[in-house]
Image (tube, rainbow, N blue to C red):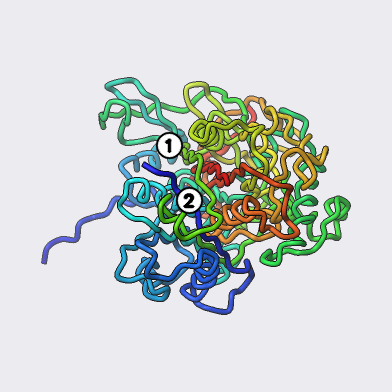
């Protein structure tokens, strides 16, 4: 059985208050991916629509999108694993292609979060946790990740400034990404200025500047068999490794609060499948839903030892010129986080990097790229390794 | 006309806002009312569960018994919220946390009368049933 490639990538701009309906939002990412792959709707054998539920009035968006995107009568279905939905979509597309059921599959992620208020959105996000036993206490995503931040700080001496420096790095590159929501520079001093919005408390120790923002957006990946990829694409990017794992939804079922077990398990699987090790990775996208999440990711992926993640950002190793550039597109912190679209956007960035087409975000001649995409509070984890 | 079937929705009393009303472990609420925080144990294989469950995934038994969460647990993780999701604004600020009892862990809130400066990871705390001003029930972690 042959290899599987990504032959087209696209995403909409990530924005607040997208002026259109969800099908129109989906069209933006889809159109860019289709034009990138230089294929037509007749070439697509099936579509997988990925998002987190309960943001839209529309139930079962797959059928509506398939019609709007011209993908009927081909099969289409919906897949969700919260923020990691598109990475899991890619995993599903890989298996459909590998099994020989389809030759070319579109994976489309989307989220239009602006239809509800920020507090309502936090409530929805909080209900991505255990609604029977945890949500009645008033939980939300920043508070869960804040628990991990606090534990990491106490155990390893990671500081508030270390966390803020992740945001500073993110903004360095977010400014270069024309699709990003937040494109302004961020300075460390903003976090200690009580007048600056970045320093506003959310859930201790996390501040506004430590958190990514809700956004509206779509992303799309065109996945193809080796034969089709070679026929259709001049620069296919190959899927070398896929890893995925799940964990206890209730925090009381976890053994680890200074890292995400799902990321460690998914990374181990992906490295093994690809036959590479962390030091072989030339460029990575990690799920920086919060600043602390990026530091945990460095450690969970093996870029740094447990407790030493902060050194990669303070030593600028994860900057463009460093030993392992991370989040050259500004990450979730700069782009915004339209849940279902995020994984596809991360994968798009790595595909562009590997093709040498990332523009101002381009790192020097990468051969192996990695995507780390997490759903919920380390509830679902997906790690994808791509190569030229 | 047939009599309307009564729905056992006791669980809607759990927490500031409950998102679940019907569950097979509804007795948890009665125990809370009596001042007891209880988990479940599988009678057939001895597996211990908190939060309580009606079913054992290890031996597929639904033969469960209640046990009381008693003694002290160690504070393993916590965060104080300064911003709340819809429905929890009046509770602010509040602190969510995990206590480790060895055989099981408990997720809940730290009691509001525990001062911030006294909260340290690794400290011993106990789990106590609590009545909210609204009449709803939850449990909180207190200093022993």
* Total labels drawn: 2
Please give left or right for residue A187 compared with residue A98 in the image. Answer: right
Q: Residue at x 50, y 54 (%)?
A: A6
Is residue B13 depicted above or below A67 in this figure? above
- Residue extending farthest left: B1
Q: CA distance from mark 2 to mark 1?
A: 61 Å
Q: Quadrant of the N terminus of chain A?
A: top left
Chain where mark 1 sits: B
Residue located 72% across and 44% down the image = A325
Look at the numbered discs 2 and 1 and tell me whether their residues touch, using CB distance below 8 Å.
no
Q: What residue does disc 2 label?
A: A5
Is residue A22 visible to us here?
A: yes
Residue A276's x, y, as percent? 57, 32
Q: Residue at x 40, y 36 (%)?
A: B31
Is A71 or A134 nearer to us in this picture? Answer: A71
Q: Residue at x 62, y 39 (%)?
A: B110
Q: Quadrant of residue A3?
A: top left
Location of residue B93 in the rendering, given as x and y in whole percent from the top left corner: 67, 50
Q: What chain does mark 2 sit on?
A: A
Give the SS element for disc 1.
Answer: loop
The foreground one among A26 and A132 is A26
Q: Which of the numbered marks, if any, corresponds to residue B58?
A: none
A324 and A147: which one is in front? A324
State the mark number for residue B34: 1
Residue A92 horizontal side relative to residue A146, left or right = left
Rendered position, B118 above or below A376 = above
Q: Residues within 10 Å of mark 1 (few under 14, many from 20)?
A: few
The spot of residue B113 in percent (x, y) is 68, 40
Residue A33: x %, y % from top left: 52, 65
Quadrant in which residue A16 is drawn: bottom right
């Amino acid at each position: 059985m042959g290899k599987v490639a990504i032959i087209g990538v696209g995403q909409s701009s990530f924005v607040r208050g997208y002026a259109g309906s969800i099908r129109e939002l989906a069209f933006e990412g889809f159109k860019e991916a289709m034009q990138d792959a230089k294929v037509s709707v007749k070439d697509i054998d099936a579509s997988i629509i990925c998002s987190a539920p309960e943001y839209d009035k529309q139930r079962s968006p797959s059928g509506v999108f398939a019609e709007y995107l011209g993908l009927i009568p081909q099969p289409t279905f919906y897949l969700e694993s919260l923020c990691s939905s598109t990475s899991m979509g890619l995993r599903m597309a890989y298996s459909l292609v590998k099994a020989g059921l389809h030759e070319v599959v579109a994976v489309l992620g989307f989220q239009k979060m602006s239809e509800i208020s920020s507090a309502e959105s936090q409530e929805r996000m909080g209900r991505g946790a255990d609604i029977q036993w945890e949500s009645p206490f008033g939980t939300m995503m920043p508070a869960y990740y804040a628990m991990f931040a606090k534990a990491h700080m106490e155990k390893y001496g990671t500081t508030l400034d270390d966390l803020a420096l992740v945001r500073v790095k993110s903004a360095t590159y977010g400014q270069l990404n024309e699709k990003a929501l937040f494109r302004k520079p961020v300075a460390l001093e903003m976090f200690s200025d009580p007048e600056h919005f970045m320093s506003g408390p959310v859930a201790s120790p996390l501040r506004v500047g430590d958190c990514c923002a809700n956004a509206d957006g779509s992303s799309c990946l065109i996945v193809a068999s080796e034969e089709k990829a070679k026929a259709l694409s001049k620069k296919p990017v190959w899927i070398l490794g896929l890893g995925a794992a799940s964990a206890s939804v209730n925090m009381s079922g976890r053994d680890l609060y200074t890292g995400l077990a799902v990321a460690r398990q998914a990374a181990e699987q992906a490295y093994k499948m690809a036959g590479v090790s962390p030091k072989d990775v030339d460029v990575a996208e990690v799920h920086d839903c919060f600043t602390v999440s990026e530091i945990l990711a460095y450690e969970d992926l093996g870029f740094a030892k447990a407790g030493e993640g902060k050194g990669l950002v303070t030593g600028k190793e994860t900057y463009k010129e460093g030993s392992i550039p991370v989040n050259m597109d500004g990450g979730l912190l700069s782009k915004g986080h339209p849940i279902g679209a995020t994984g596809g956007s991360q994968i798009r960035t790595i595909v562009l990097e590997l093709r040498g087409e990332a523009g101002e975000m381009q790192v020097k001649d990468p051969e192996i790229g990695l995507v780390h995409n997490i759903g919920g509070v380390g509830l679902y984890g997906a790690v994808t390794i791509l190569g030229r | 006309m047939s009599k309307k079937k009564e729905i056992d929705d006791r669980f809607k009393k759990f927490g500031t806002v409950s998102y679940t009303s019907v569950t097979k472990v509804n007795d948890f609420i009665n125990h809370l009312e009596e001042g007891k925080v209880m988990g479940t144990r599988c009678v057939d294989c001895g597996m211990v569960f908190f939060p309580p469950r009606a079913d054992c995934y290890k031996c597929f038994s639904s033969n469960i018994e209640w046990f009381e969460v008693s003694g002290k647990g160690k504070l393993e993780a916590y965060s104080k919220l300064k911003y709340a999701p819809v429905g929890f604004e009046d509770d602010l600020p509040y602190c969510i946390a995990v206590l480790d009892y060895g055989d099981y862990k408990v997720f809940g809130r730290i009691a509001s009368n525990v001062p911030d400066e006294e909260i340290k990871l690794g400290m011993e705390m106990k789990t106590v049933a609590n009545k909210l001003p609204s009449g709803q029930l939850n449990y909180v972690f207190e200093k022993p």
